[in-house]
Amino acid sequence: VAVHSTTGHRVAMKIINRRRIATMNMVERIKREIQYLKLLRHPHIIKLYEVITTPTDIIMVMEYAPFELFNFIVEKGKVTEDETRRFFQQIISAVEYCHRHKIVHRDLKPENVLLDENYNVKIADFGLSNIMTDGDFLKTSCGSPNYAAPEVINGKLYAGPEVDVWSCGVMLYVMLCGRLPFDDEYIPLLFKKISGGIFTLPSHLSPETKQLLSSMLVVDPLKRITIENIRKNKWFNTNLPDYLKPITSSPYDLTSDIDENIINELRKKLGYSREQILRGLKSEGENQIKVACALVIDHKRMINDDTTNHTQTTTSNVSSLPTAIPSSTTTPPSNSIPNTPNTSSIAGAGRNPIATPIRKHKTRSKWHFGIRSKSLPLDIMLEIYKALKKIGMKWKSIDQYHIRVLYESKCNTKIKFDIQLYQIENNSYLVDFKDA
């Protein structure tokens, strides 16, 4: 956990060792999680504020959510129906948001559902997520066995959304009952129970929750309830906050003239040139640029609607924000200035009351460690050398932008530390200090 020195907001730091993820074949999983979280913006999806890369580590600076739904359930035994409904409404809203923008989570479970200080849901861990393409079917067995759908554990083809619905059904059961619907230490027997849809509904459950669970935990994915129909469920809609209600917006035409501000935003977020963006928008079929453009337009609509609704003292609905995936992430050579990937600004970093609409802050903040400068890299290094020389420190060069410093005090105490320069965006650099 870290604290932003200016705003005082707490953030979580996920530090990932490059060598470790390489040996564990997790590079693609981490890259996927960063790419998806980088632009996802929903009140109940964990926010990624910044990614800082070093030669040895990847540091993800994320929204701080101190609790897990899993621990909450363990401590409670089982959750009350009203509390369960509030969590479930937030989860379904976030999952629907992902599906609407072609992302299926594939590993939904209480351990991956975090809770903020006000016990609002924050879905995390998108490492197993995948992009859905119209007409395409996935065939990757992933996720946790107890929460995995029958078609997943049996290696069958699946479109995507239906496996998340099953996992949400298992989570709903766990919250209401305090135990798993499908459980066995012997994995083959567990798979048999899941494949057969064998589970019991305790007598203390209300008829409405029994009906909803029975429609979600259906073995045949074609007969399983959809999120659209969950949205229509009477139990689900009881005390549903306005900000979680479905949005209704008119379709947009990506072939018409696009605002230059939107193009510039896409250039910044995706790293594509203006020509590549225009070419992508004009090309046939679905692509990352079109999805990103549609989401940016949705985001601007949300801001406009929010401003209008605020003036009229009404509550605004949650809308879509950018979720496009860059095609690749390049790692700079060791003798160059390492880059910190660009990220979108913080939206709604403050805490909010339980079950109330979460407003977006309009101030833009950046999360960095160390000292920022817009001077030329060589000028920055020269200033560092001058400062070290002035106070009598010794140093040796590890590479052009990385030095190891030795300080000896009058009482013969020796302190070693590294100073390294990073590029965090165009014409902006970061001087980082760390223990050697």
Image: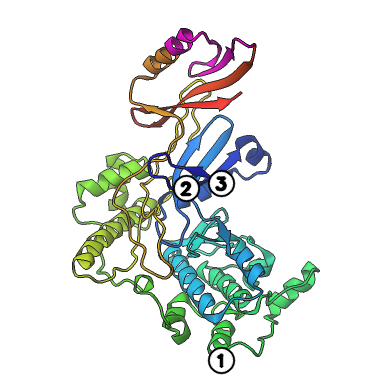
Mark 3 belongs to which amino acid?
Ile
Q: Which mark is residue 207?
A: 1
Rendering coords of residue 124 (x, y %)? 53, 57
Residue in the picture at 36% in, 63% down: 358
Q: Residue at x 68, y 43 (%)?
A: 24
* Any part of residue 132 in sight: no
Q: Which mark is residue 10?
A: 2
Is label 2 or label 3 in front?
2
Structural crowding at the residue carrying mark 1, measured as other residues with C-alpha within 10 Å and reported as few (<14), some (14–19) or many (≥20)? few
Residue 214 image position (x, y, % from top left)? 59, 85
Name the side, left or right, on which 292 lies relative to 158.
Answer: left
Q: In the rendered structure, which segment of residues is drawn in magenta? A: 385-411
Q: Quadrant of residue 183?
A: bottom right
Of 421 and 37, nearer the camera is 421
Q: Is residue 79 above or below residue 403?
A: below
The mark lying in front, picked from 2 and 1, is: 2
Q: Using the rendered view, name the quadrant where residue 72 is placed.
A: bottom right
